[in-house]
Each structure stands twice: as C-alpha cells, then as structure tokens.
Image: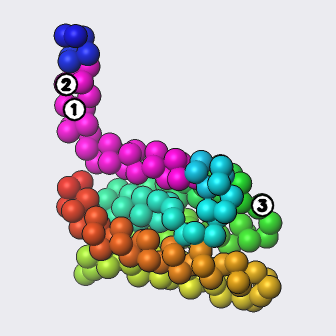
C-alpha cells in the first residue's frame, strides 16, 4: 500500500514539474488512441475527429515551430498508418500540410491568441486539403466534405473550449 502511494505521489510530482511535457504527452496518447479507434471502426474515417491538429498547434505555440512541425509529422504519420488510411497520392499534400501547420503555430504567436490561431489554422488546412482534393480527385469530394466539416467543428470546439486554459497552463 505504501509503495503504491509513493509511486502515485511521485507521478503527481513529476507531472507537476514536467506539466508542459505531460499535457503534450497525454494529448499525443489520445491522438494515437483515436487513430486505433478509426482503424478498428472503418466507418469512423469519414468523421473528422483527430487530436493531431490540436496537439501540433499547442506544441508549436509552446515549444516553437520546429517542435510543432516534428509533433505534427510524427502524429499525422501515426494517424494515417494506425487509422489505416490509404497511402495514395493524397498523403503527398496531407503530411506537408500538417507539418507546415505545426511550424506556423510556433511562428504566428505575436498578436493572436492561441484559440484563434488554432481555429484559423484548422480552417486553413481544411481549405487547402479541400482545394487539392477538388483539383486532383474531384470524385472524392463527397467523401472528403463530411470529414472536413466535422473536423472544423471538432477542432473549433477544442480550441474554443480547451485552447486558452491549456495554453495558459503550460505556456
């Protein structure tokens, strides 16, 4: 009993001391868990629920553009692989778009709040992906639109409700 209590207290102290990293790690684990869910339930692919955007933007905002880009790269690749998304030409712009978003989140921190930055970057990445889908695979627009709409709504809720509290907690 004392050993479990000591471990629990140690973990709480560690989480407090390393809270910046702890919150990012929890979000990254959540992102991977969502990817597993999508990989298991293929019908979930058309729903735009993912934590890659929120985690990458938060990481870039707090730790700078390079870390934002690295987290975006790792999480989007894991999301695509674990979620069993097809490895077609689509990934040629999706992966760089997420990396760019992670990078920009660390450079556009001047006169904009974290929640608005996240909402703008969510809109930008979805618009960019939508335009490239229309140009390259217009027949897939019907499949992409539900994802894009739900992704914008999901990330809007994340950034508007959790963005400022989490950013101020770890900034």
Question: Can residue 24 be seen in the rendering of this structure?
Answer: yes
The quadrant of the rendering that contains the N terminus is top left
In front: 126, or 104? Answer: 126
Above or below residue 144? Residue 85 is above
Query: How far is disc 3 from disc 2 in space, using C-alphas?
Result: 44 Å
Q: Magenta span covers which residues?
A: 7-35
The residue located at (38%, 76%) in the rendering is: 156
Q: Position of residue 30 (x, y in %)?
A: 45, 49
Residue wearing tag 2: 9
Contact between labelled residues 2 and 1, with CB atoms less than 8 Å apart: yes
The quadrant of the rendering that contains the C terminus is bottom left
Q: Position of residue 44 (x, y in %)?
A: 61, 62
SS at circle 3:
loop
Residue wearing tag 3: 87
Compared across the picture, whether 27 is left or right of 95 comes to: left
Q: Position of residue 80 (x, y in %)?
A: 66, 57
Q: Magenta residues: mostly which secondary structure?
A: helix
Dot 3 or dot 2: first in sequence order is 2
In front: 41, or 51? Answer: 41
Q: Quadrant of residue 93?
A: bottom right
In front: 19, or 40? Answer: 40
SS at circle 1:
helix
The residue located at (77%, 61%) in the rendering is: 86
Q: Say whether residue 13 is magenta.
A: yes
Q: Quadrant of residue 87?
A: bottom right
Residue wearing tag 1: 12
């Amino acid at each position: 009993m004392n050993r479990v209590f000591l471990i629990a207290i140690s973990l709480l102290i560690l989480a407090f001391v390393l809270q910046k990293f702890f919150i990012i790690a929890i979000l990254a684990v959540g992102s991977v868990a969502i990817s597993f869910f999508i990989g298991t339930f293929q019908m979930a692919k058309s729903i735009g629920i993912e934590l890659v955007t929120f985690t990458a933007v938060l990481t870039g905002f707090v730790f700078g553009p390079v870390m934002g880009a690295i987290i975006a790269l790792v999480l989007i690749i894991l999301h695509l692989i674990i979620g069993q998304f097809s490895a077609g030409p689509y990934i040629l712009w999706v992966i760089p778009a997420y990396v760019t978003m992670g990078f920009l989140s660390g450079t556009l921190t001047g006169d904009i709040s974290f929640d608005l930055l996240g909402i703008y970057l969510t809109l930008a990445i979805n618009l960019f992906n939508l335009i490239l889908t229309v140009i390259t695979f217009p027949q897939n627009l019907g499949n992409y639109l539900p994802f894009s709409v739900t992704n914008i709504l999901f990330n809007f809720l994340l950034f508007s409700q959790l963005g400022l509290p989490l950013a101020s907690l770890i900034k």
